[in-house]
Image (cartoon, rainbow, N blue to C red):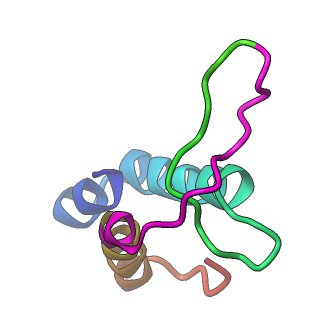
Amino acid sequence: VSALLAKATGNTTYLDAAISSVTFIQSHFSNEEHVIKDNISARKNDLCSSGSGMNPYNYGLFIEGLAILDSISENATM
């Protein structure tokens, strides 16, 4: 959502939020092979561990957000 808002408004606050979202997803949802897992635990003692599921139907929003962010950002490392 923040990438779409950044594109629609040109507001850098939304762009910063979109970049932070990508960083969070890469840090907490990505496995060793850089595959994005589809959930994360918020239980008290799980330390934000990601689940083992990797369902492709959950990738659509992530891919869309990255595509929008790529179209408005100069950051080639995302």
Along the line of sight, which residue is nearer the eye, 1 or 30? 30
Q: Main secondary structure of the magenta part?
A: loop
75 is within the stretch colored magenta: no
Q: Relative to 37, is 70 on the left or the right? A: left
Q: Quadrant of the C terminus?
A: bottom right
Task: Identify the residue shown where x is 43% and y is 82%.
Answer: 70
The vertical placement of 45 against 2, above or below, is: above
Task: Identify the residue shown where x is 63% and y is 47%.
Answer: 51
Q: Position of residue 19 (x, y in %)?
A: 54, 58
Along the line of sight, which residue is nearer the eye, 76 or 21? 21
The vertical placement of 59 against 51, above or below, is: below
Q: Position of residue 53 (x, y in %)?
A: 55, 58
Q: Position of residue 12 (x, y in %)?
A: 41, 53
Task: Identify the residue shown where x is 50% and y is 55%.
Answer: 38
Which stretch appears magenta?
45-60
51 is within the stretch colored magenta: yes
Q: Relative to 50, is 18 on the left or the right? A: left
Along the line of sight, which residue is nearer the eye, 24 or 14? 24
Q: Relative to 75, is 45 on the left or the right? A: right
- Judged from this view, the residue extending furthest toward the top is 44
The vertical placement of 53 against 64, above or below, is: above
- Judged from this view, the residue extending furthest toward the left is 8
Q: Quadrant of residue 76?
A: bottom right
